[in-house]
Image: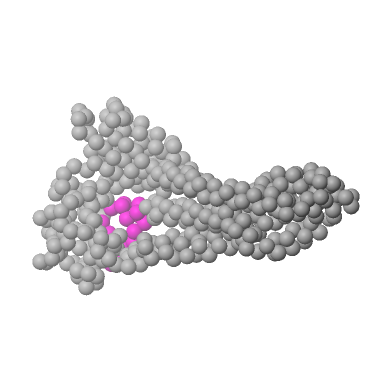
Amino acid sequence: MSILESVELALKNIVSSKTRTLLTMLGIIIGVAAVIVIVGLGNGLEQYVTDSFSDMGTNTLTVSVMSRGSTRSLSVDDMYEIVEENSEYLDLCSPIAPMGGYVKIGSETISSTSVQGVSEDYFEISGDTVAKGRGLQYSDMASRSKVCVIGAYLDLACFGGNAVGETLRVGGQSLTVVGVLEQTDEDLEEGGADDCLYLPYSTASRISGEISSYTITMRDEDHIDESVAALENALYAVFASDDYYTVTSMAEMLDTMTSMINILVGVLAGIAAISLVVGGIGIMNIMLVSVTERTREIGIRKSLGAKERYIMEQFVIEAACTSALGGVIGILLGDVLSVVATQVVAQLMEETLTVAPTLGAVLMAFGISVGIGILFGYLPAKKAARLNPIDALHYD
């Protein structure tokens, strides 16, 4: 009997017991669908995190200085000097002076706005574009000008789209709006990315106190380790200890986040794969029942000269076909659930996260399902092949 004939016979046996076959395949179907959805979710999360970090700039380094307790300190001029001395690795630098408190526009007080003191290079570092007016300039830093650049939300919500030239108050200081940033989010909302205000770091430090963090860009992302090492060595030379500063690379953070996502997805996929093992046990169980039910058939075939390997081949192929069919159904179900999950995540999180299983994951899930069918079908097939034809013919 050829393999094609064995496959044809296996399909006939599967079709003749539809309900039993469907129940047998249920574990395989659930396992394959679960693996596909989980891997797709992992791919979606990885892409979402990558896009988020790309928006922040993977070529940036964040330096946090905690000089409290140290006899030495680092001024803004010192940091600029460090960047200049290591210009082969480092490029732009912006001190960051976060400010608490409220923004007052006329009689209205706004508490949701993010307020930061930055340098004239910050918008180039962050990738923001000034849509109206001008950005911050070096002269603003040098003279501690009381000016600011605001986000599109404040411009539209508080000034009706005509904020340039108007004034507002931050930390008790009156600031003149000299520029408005281009809208970045699809929707303008309170507390969003466009609800922001930037003023010169020199002005902010006078209002809120000491500057303790810096954002620095690298000239080449392929030399992250060298850039970090150069910066850390320069800071160590200032403080004579590494307890008073931290240097964080956005690219390293992205790699760490991606690794954590991959580990989580691997664990969840492994748990889901247990269903495949359960499905395999179900296939082995039903194949053992099938061997018992078809004992006389096996006896007749062996008495007519069928070799053991042909009997074994028939039952292994039948188990593989059952498992493969379950795998196909599981793949189709997994694709449907992935589309549904994409819509559900978008509605619940209000974020675009595409649950997209890769072709590799689909092929792997299908291959595993077929492999499990062959593995768990081997024992019943071996039992069928070793039946004594005389005993099989007398079986009732």
Q: Residue at x 32, y 68 (%)?
A: 187
Residue 65: x and y in percent read: 26, 37
Residue 98: x and y in percent read: 22, 49
Q: Quadrant of residue 156?
A: bottom left
Q: Quadrant of the N terminus?
A: bottom right
Can I make out residue 311 in this image? no
Is 94 or 20 nearer to us in this picture?
20
Is 259 or 129 nearer to us in this picture?
259
Q: Residue at x 10, y 66 (%)?
A: 107
Marks counted in the figure total 0
Residue 289 part of the magenta segment: no
Q: Measured along the vertical axis of the image, is residue 210 above or below residue 148?
A: above
Residue 336: x and y in percent read: 53, 65
Is 48 or 293 nearer to us in this picture?
293
Q: Would residue 266 appear left or right of 384 to someone viewing this image?
A: left
Is 292 or 179 nearer to us in this picture?
292
Residue projecting furthest to the bottom = 160
Q: Residue at x 44, y 60 (%)?
A: 353
Q: Would residue 329 appear left or right of 15 to someone viewing this image?
A: left
Residue projecting furthest to the right = 305
Q: Measured along the vertical axis of the image, is residue 265 above or below residue 108?
A: above
Residue 48: x and y in percent read: 43, 55
Q: Would residue 42 appear left or right of 66 to someone viewing this image?
A: right
Can I make out residue 167 in this image? yes
What is the span of residues highlighted in magenta in the rendered image? 120-136
Q: Measured along the vertical axis of the image, is residue 235 above or below residue 43?
A: above
Q: Residue at x 25, y 64 (%)?
A: 190
